[in-house]
Image (spheres, coloured by chain):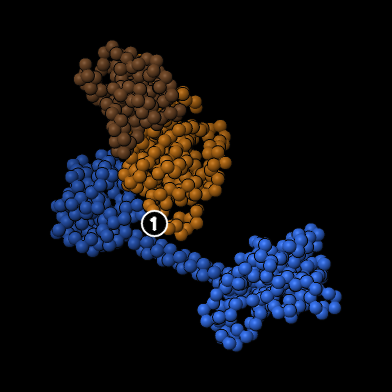
Chain colours: A orange, B brown, C blue
């Protein structure tokens, strides 16, 4: 399935509004300036065999993944992904100064995992919530689960074979001048993507009226 | 009346223009896709009102606003952005922008822009 | 609420608060009573933001509103929100909404994770101790190395280090076809100083002399204590004899200025010099020759420097004595 440039543009804008809201909330919580941006978006289809989003050069090593499932009008799973070393950096910023780091770069304790869960909840909810708002669809979702996975595992990790489509959002997180690059992978069923595209079609037509 | 809309999203450009047109009669709308182009078009067309997004490639909204304000302290600038942080908003208000709206832009927000413009006349 | 359900909620091992749409507290379980010290009677019917002022923050209120309106499920981690519920415990807080046709409720669960903090703090403490211990060990190692190679009293190189380095210097000089100078220094009348003024004063003299020697040489030269009141200096890359003469005059300069309380005498020393490869090709040979030259300096009254090359082969009377006097160039 191919979607028009304008549909990409609409989706990107919707996601930017979503991450903008989560940035505002995170900035209040950590009492620091937070900038979140979706500079790039990809739609990947599994119908035609394997595809490889997330360039290997950047997405190597352990990745920290928070995932939520959503149901009802749209069915799928959304995953917020950060390289573990970047996540460590982020956690250190979140917990403020004076937090001596006793773990190695790639290790996380229970307290860290809870923080990751909270951040994942905020970001993923804003994104999925904004998509729901925009498309006027009510969505139902769970609290995120946090996992440590490799890139290969994420690629193979499509929970449900019904999820034929993957939306990959590359996101940039800037917190106190530190830039952290991550991604959001949204797995969608064919029906869900069709639903989204139908709504976007109508919007596109309305735009040029 | 001439307005300039600067946004890297074509979709936002079109929806913002549409909503403004629906509430303000007789406006000429000019678009720019990023801060740099925005600066060029601003100098070329001298718009009455500038609507600007913040997060854009090739010069962000903050920088553009500073440049426009330096050129003309009285310039009418309205910010429409997905960045809803208080600190960002406060910083911009210090530059003397006319209004700040969170995205998504809506008819209600367009109406309050119309009111603001009417008040200026 | 039916009493069996409230009994159940009072037994669960986490805090449960149930709110109505205006955030008024409808239920407050036993766990909450114990965790906060606020009894059910005090909490019920009050606004939750009043009872738990830690929650009175924009993002928390926004989250609860979103939970009511959009079924958002807020989750607040103890790590990012210290003291959200109470100062006495660290808690993760989650919210969820339940609704029927007539009304909506918010359920707030408070999960005590203080034990995680205790564990993490234990770990941190353990890691800190380990790193302290590690540091201590490293310092001890350094100390041991220092003791093995440096003289404890004067802090210049000891014999072991001297021999190690002398080997290297000789090899280097051989490879580069350079000269290597060795100065053998012996204090004059040191035994007398020790006997008359005590070992403490004697030690002080040794320390002072070692300092003067160290200051008088170039960065790459080596000063070592050979034993008792004997010091050695290695002078690699010696271009001509004037070099050791310069060192000698600097040493004499310093020595002449030494003043030690309780010691009315002036400190003086005798120096013998040997040169590789002219006077010998091994460390021991060079030391022997320098020692012999030093002995000649001493037998002429001391406070002088003699080079082995200038000694007559029989070694009777020194033909050339570099007295400290007149050598201050």
- Relative to the observer, which residue lies in front, C289 or C75? C289
Residue found at x 78% / y 63% = C179
Residue that protrudes farthest toward the bottom in the picture: C195
Position in image of residue C160 (x %, y %): 69, 74
Position in image of residue B116 (x %, y %): 23, 22
Residue that protrudes farthest toward the top in the picture: B26
Name which quarter of the figure residue C268 lies in. Answer: bottom right
- Relative to the observer, which residue lies in front, A57 or B86? B86
Can you identify the residue that label 1 sits on? Answer: A98
Crowdedness near tag 1: few (<14), some (14–19) or many (≥20) residues, C-alpha within 10 Å = few
Q: Is residue C292 visible?
A: yes
Residue found at x 49% / y 25% = A2
Residue found at x 53% / y 43% = A59
Q: In the image, C266: left or right of C221? A: left
Q: Is residue A130 visible?
A: no
Q: Chain of mark 1?
A: A
Position in image of residue C74 (x %, y %): 31, 46
Query: Does residue C16 sit above or below C265 in this rendering?
Result: above
Q: In the image, B54: left or right of C310? A: left
Q: Secondary structure at mark 1?
A: loop
Name which quarter of the figure residue C66 lies in. Answer: top left
Count of numbered labels shown in the rendering: 1
Name which quarter of the figure residue C232 lies in. Answer: bottom right
Residue found at x 42% / y 52% = A92
Position in image of residue C231 (x %, y %): 67, 74
Location of the C terminus of chain B by quadrant is: top left
- Relative to the observer, which residue lies in front, C193 or C223? C193
Location of the N terminus of chain B by quadrant is: top left
């Amino acid at each position: 399935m191919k979607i028009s440039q304008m549909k990409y543009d609409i989706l990107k804008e919707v996601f930017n509004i979503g991450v903008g809201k989560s940035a505002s909330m995170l900035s209040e919580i950590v009492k620091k300036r937070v900038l979140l941006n979706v500079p790039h978006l990809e739609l990947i289809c599994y119908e035609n065999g394997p595809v490889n989003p997330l360039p290997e050069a950047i997405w190597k090593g352990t990745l920290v993944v928070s995932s939520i499932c959503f149901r009802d009008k749209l069915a799928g799973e959304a995953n917020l992904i950060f390289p573990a070393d970047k996540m460590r950096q982020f956690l250190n910023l979140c917990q403020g100064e004076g937090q001596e780091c006793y773990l190695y770069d790639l290790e996380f304790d229970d307290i860290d995992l809870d923080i990751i869960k909270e951040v994942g909840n905020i970001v993923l909810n804003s994104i999925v919530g904004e998509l729901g708002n925009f498309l006027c669809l009510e969505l139902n979702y769970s609290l995120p689960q946090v996992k440590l996975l490799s890139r290969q595992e994420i690629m193979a990790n499509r929970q449900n074979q019904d999820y034929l489509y993957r939306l990959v959002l590359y996101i940039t997180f800037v917190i106190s001048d530190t830039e952290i690059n991550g991604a959001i992978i949204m797995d969608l069923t064919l029906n869900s993507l069709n639903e989204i595209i139908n709504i976007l079609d109508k919007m596109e037509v309305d735009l040029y009226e | 009346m001439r307005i300039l809309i600067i946004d890297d999203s074509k979709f936002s450009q079109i929806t913002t223009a549409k909503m403004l047109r629906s509430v303000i009669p007789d406006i000429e709308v000019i678009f720019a896709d990023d801060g740099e182009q925005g600066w060029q078009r601003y100098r070329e067309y001298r718009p009455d009102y500038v609507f600007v997004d913040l997060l854009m490639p090739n010069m962000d909204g903050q920088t553009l606003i500073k440049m426009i304000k330096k050129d003309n302290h009285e310039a009418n600038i309205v910010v429409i952005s997905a960045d809803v942080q208080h600190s960002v908003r406060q910083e911009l208000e210090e530059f003397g922008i006319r209004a700040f709206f969170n995205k998504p832009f809506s008819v209600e927000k367009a109406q309050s822009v119309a009111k603001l413009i009417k008040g200026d006349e | 609420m039916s009493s069996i359900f409230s009994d159940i909620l009072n037994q669960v091992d986490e805090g449960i608060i149930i709110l109505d749409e205006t955030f008024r507290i409808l239920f407050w379980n036993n766990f909450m009573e114990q965790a906060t010290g606020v009894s059910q009677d005090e909490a019920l019917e009050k606004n939750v933001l009043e009872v738990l002022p830690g929650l009175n923050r924009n993002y928390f209120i926004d989250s609860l509103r979103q939970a009511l309106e959009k079924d958002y499920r807020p989750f607040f981690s103890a790590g990012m929100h210290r003291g959200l519920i109470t100062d006495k415990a660290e808690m993760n807080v989650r919210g969820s909404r339940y609704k029927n046709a007539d009304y909506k409720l918010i359920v707030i669960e408070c999960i005590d994770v203080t034990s995680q903090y205790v564990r993490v703090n234990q770990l941190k403490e353990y890691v800190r101790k380990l790193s302290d211990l590690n540091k201590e060990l490293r310092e001890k190692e350094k100390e041991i190395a220092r003791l093995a190679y440096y003289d404890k009293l004067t802090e210049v190189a000891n014999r072991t280090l001297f021999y190690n380095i002398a080997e290297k210097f000789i090899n280097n000089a051989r490879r580069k076809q350079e000269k290597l100078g060795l100065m053998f220094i012996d204090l004059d009348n040191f035994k007398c100083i020790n006997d008359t003024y005590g070992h403490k004063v004697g030690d002080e003299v040794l320390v002072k002399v070692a300092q003067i020697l160290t200051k008088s040489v170039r960065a790459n030269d080596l000063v070592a204590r050979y034993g008792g009141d004997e010091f050695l200096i290695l002078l690699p890359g010696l271009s001509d004899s004037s070099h050791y003469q310069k060192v000698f005059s600097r040493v004499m300069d310093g020595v002449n200025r030494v003043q030690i309380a309780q010691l009315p005498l002036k400190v003086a020393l005798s120096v013998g010099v040997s040169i590789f490869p002219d006077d010998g090709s091994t460390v021991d040979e060079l030391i022997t020759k320098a020692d012999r030259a030093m002995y000649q300096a001493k037998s002429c009254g001391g406070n002088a420097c003699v080079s082995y090359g200038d000694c007559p082969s029989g070694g009777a009377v020194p033909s050339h004595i570099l007295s400290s006097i007149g050598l201050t160039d």
